[in-house]
Amino acid sequence: MKYAFFWWMLMLIGMSHSSATETKRPNFLFILVDDQSPFDLKCYNPESSLETPSIESLARDGMVFDGAYHMGSYVGAVCSPSRHMIMSGRTVWHLPTAPLATQKGLCPPNLEQQTIPAVFNRAGYATMRTCKQGNSYEAANKLFTVRHDATKRGGTPETGSPWHGDRVMEYLAERESSKDVKPFLIYFGFSHPHDERDGTPELLAKYGATNHTDKTNPPPANPKQPLLPSNYLPAHPFPHGHPGLRDEVAVSGVWERRDERTIRNEVGRQFACSENIDIQIGRVLKKLEMMGELDNTYVVYTADHGMAIGRHGLQGKQNLYQHTWRVPFIVKGPGIQPGSRVEGNVYLLDVLATLCDLAGIAPPETNEGTSFKPILTGQKQTVRDVLYGVYSGGTKPGMRSVKKGDWKLIKVDAMNGSVRETQLFHLKDNPNEFVTEHHDEQVYSLTGAKPASHQVNLATDPKYADKLAEMESLLLTEMRRLNDPWRLWNQPNDGLTPPPEGPLSGQGKGKKKK
Ligand SMILES: [Ca+2]
């Protein structure tokens, strides 16, 4: 009897010890919105009229990344490769859905077993997910222990962002009542602000917008609508390279219209949807605080890619200008200096390695991302110097980009060689990537943003010929390093046999899903 009591005491001590160790492991709240340019948010663009107090509070209490990118896409539905990269930490041409990747041995089989939910399940985390359905990584998504996915793009609580917020609130309430002490990883995804951007009546009214459905006429003007983006153009200067692309021609409310009223209304709709997302984030952060979990939780806020909506005369996500190649990226959590700001040069595919690093878990061998924990802890400003981007979902090879320091090169080789364009930007001098067309008085009288004379594409300026050659060479190096299956018109073909092109999909986002 005496011994039984002794063992019982020992067990109690052991239990309290292991639960103390358990609570020290950090939680993760990974927030992913669908289609948002960083420049919509005040912390990236103080002139933006979008009000997102919860996201701004994350920026104030955490770290803002100025250089966070998605690596790109080989299909019109940019969401899909982006979400595969987030989940698996693989580079763009090494994904299970990349052309010929599996056949060429560039992607291991059963990769889903090495993705965020699989890795964190094995490490003893409770994993929960809510997000849109489709254009994602289904094999990985279904590994979350708790999963509530549905595409919610309406303007009511049941059909819009509150639905995703409710799922997380329910999950947290359940944890609370069951006294679950496992650390958690919550993948808090939204279906908005992706089109169709049907906001709530109140938020639409706040941003002067209407859910416009009349294709033949522009929506009504309203002074409450957000102003035109400063790099707005009425048309892109050359063919985009993806004829019939849904996002550029068929989005309800915009179609092929690029007039001021249409774009300002659509940005208003985007903002109405983004503010509704912010409200949901606010609810969840407050709940975590009440549960005493917030201080031990890393909160990551990001989007699967950026978005044009009138910038450079484009409407969609299928381009490599900064507004679309970049993503918003904010992290708040233990050990992160509040109000800090870094360049970072991170990709979304670095998320897996970083979350593992923060949790003290070894990343899977299949991971190709780099942990940016040293940035979060203030030891480093960047994790790499050179960034590569691709859009190859239209005619081939399509668009490529490379960035190093303030210099950025974009090449477009499309439409059977009839579009061959080179753009060289110095981003510190020309952060909006202004081109000749932005210098037209008719354009800057609309935006109020008159570019300085040096704010142009520098590719044809002989002064920068050496810089152009250096960037061209860097791009080729990156294309080789990352197994890009195509080469551009002015590159060696490297003996490659590019993948068969197949029919062009005009449906940038696949069939409309509700
Ligand atoms: Ca998306």
Image (cartoon, rainbow, N blue to C red):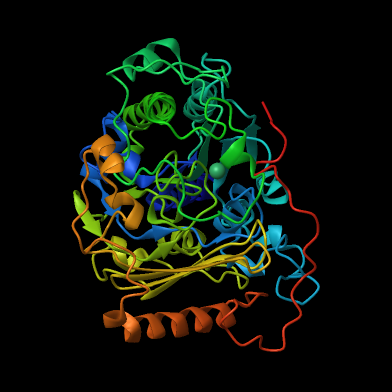
Q: Position of residue 181 (x, y in %)?
A: 48, 40
Foreground of the two, 65 or 460:
460
Residue 317 in view here: yes
**Ligand 1 location (quadrant):** top right
At x 54% / y 49%, what residue is drawn?
Answer: 125
At x 31% / y 50%, what residue is drawn?
Answer: 438
Q: Position of residue 493 (x, y in %)?
A: 66, 85
Q: Which quarter shows the N terminus?
A: top right
How many numbered markers are drawn?
Answer: 0
At x 20% / y 60%, what residue is drawn?
Answer: 453
Q: Which quarter shows the C terminus?
A: top right
Q: In this view, does 149 lie to the left or right of 284?
A: right
Q: Does 78 sit above or below residue 97?
A: above
Foreground of the two, 480 or 308:
308
Residue 334 in view here: no
Foreground of the two, 310 or 335:
310
Q: In which quarter of the image is residue 383?
A: bottom left
Q: Where is residue 504 in the image (x, y as percent from the top left)?
A: 74, 53
Q: Does 98 sit above or below residue 42?
A: below
Q: Quadrant of residue 340?
A: bottom left
Q: Is residue 62 left or right of residue 468?
A: left
Foreground of the two, 441 or 8:
441
Q: Position of residue 310 (x, y in %)?
A: 42, 40
